[in-house]
Image (tube, grey):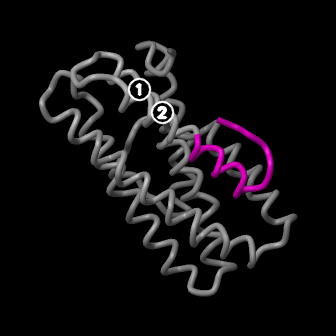
Amino acid sequence: MGHGGNVIAELTADHREVAELFDRFRALPPGDDRRRTIVDEFTIELVRHSVAEEQYLYPAVREHVPGGATLADKEIADHAAVERLLKELEGMDATDSRFGPLAERLVSEVTEHIADEEGTLFPALAEACSPERLEELGEQVRTAKKLGPTRPHPSAPDTPPANKLLAPGAGLVDRARDLVTGRGRS
């Protein structure tokens, strides 16, 4: 969840963790109950990651990167699409005939989003910001991931200031639900 380093290193490490979860998911046969557990694991990671990006990364992109508003808006739209897929998967059993294809669509969309961020957005941010600012953003992202939600909330605000105000409360409720249900403990 928290890796250290500047914002680009932090988020890239998250991307690698999620890619590993996708590989574990794809290695299991359709209908295997362990696929449900892995979907829960990558849901937790993707939601925390997305909320942190929306709170700190995308506002920094808007502020520092030429054309940053367009880049940030595209990434936020990607997040909204992924969050809707996560919400659809949330209560679905691994044996449901829609589960595998829906999860595969999610994996595909997230993989494309990661490639876009790492190929376009991260290099533009690295060029536009000082190393100190990138380190500061890394700390902010790590803090946001610790406090953020662990479940999809597609109707929640995805831009500041509302997302910074509501995410910690949603995170507290989600972590309490996870504790009671055992979700995310594998």
For the residue pair 136 and 14, the one nearer the viewer reads as 14
Q: Residues within 10 Å of mark 2 (few under 14, many from 20)?
A: some
Q: Quadrant of residue 48?
A: top right
Asked if labels 2 and 1 touch by Cβ distance under 8 angstroms, the answer is yes
Q: In the drawing, what numbered circle is on residue 21?
A: 2
For the residue pair 12 and 158, the one nearer the viewer reads as 12
Relative to 164, say whether 147 is above or below: above
Q: Quadrant of residue 53?
A: bottom right
Residue 106 image position (x, y, % from top left): 32, 46
Q: Residue furthest left?
A: 97
Please, what secondary structure does the residue beneath circle 1 have?
Answer: helix
Residue 137 image position (x, y, % from top left): 74, 58
Amino acid at dot 2: Leu
Relative to 27, say whether 69 is above or below: below
What distance separates the C-alpha of mark 1 from that of mark 2? 7 Å
Which residue appears at 47% of the width and 43% of the height?
47
- What segment carries the magenta color? 1-16
Amino acid at dot 1: Ile
Does the magenta portion include 7?
yes
Which residue appears at 43% of the width and 71% of the height?
74
Which residue appears at 51% of the width and 26% of the height?
175
Relative to 158, say whether 85 is above or below: above
Relative to 182, say whether 175 is above or below: below
Residue 122 image position (x, y, % from top left): 64, 67
Q: Main secondary structure of the magenta part?
A: helix
Q: In the shown orientation, is residue 174 left or right of residue 164?
A: left
Q: Earlier in the sequence, mark 1 or mark 2?
A: 2
Of the 4 image quadrants, the one containing the N terminus is top right
The residue wearing badge 1 is: 38
